[in-house]
Image: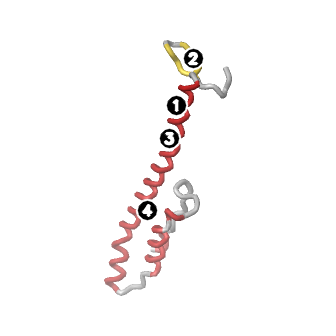
Amino acid sequence: MNEDNLYQYINGNLVELTPDEKAEYQALEAEWASATNARLAKEVRQKRNTLLQESDWAVMRALELGDDFTNFHTYRQQLRNIPSQEGFPSNVTWPSSDLL
């Protein structure tokens, strides 16, 4: 067996894929890989949105008390900038919550 060839089991026998079957398999594999990036981007955005929502109360409290909210602004802006980071969505640098 050649490692570059693709095989499937038919009735318990290992059979090499035809050129058409191989092309279809490779197209499906490429589609899956492309969709994986989109799924990951969606997950990262969901996490970012959750972190923004979780920090809403802190910003409102700082405004109500007249406190300095520069750190909140910096943290939240870094969260908003995540999709524009180089390497997004597979390599994301999350801002430190120590800013809060």
Tell me how far mark 1 sits from mark 4, CA to CA. 36 Å
Residue corresponding to mark 4: 48
The numbered mark, 1 or 3, whose residue comes first in the sequence reads: 1
Scheme of image coloration: secondary structure
Q: Which mark is residue 24?
A: 1
Tell me how far mark 1 sits from mark 3, CA to CA. 11 Å
The numbered mark, 3 or 2, whose residue comes first in the sequence reads: 2
Image position of 63 (left or right of 73)? left
Contact (CB < 8 A) between labels 3 and 2?
no
In this view, the residue farthest toward the front is 20
Mark 4: secondary structure: helix
Tell me how far mark 4 sits from mark 3, CA to CA. 26 Å
Mark 3: secondary structure: helix
Residue corresponding to mark 3: 31
Mark 2: secondary structure: strand
Contact (CB < 8 A) between labels 1 and 2?
no
Mark 1: secondary structure: helix
Residue 69 rendering spot, x and y as whole percentages = 42, 81
The residue under label 3 is which amino acid type? Glu
Residue 13 rendering spot, x and y as whole percentages = 54, 13
The residue under label 1 is which amino acid type? Glu
Q: Residue at x 56, y 57 (%)?
A: 91
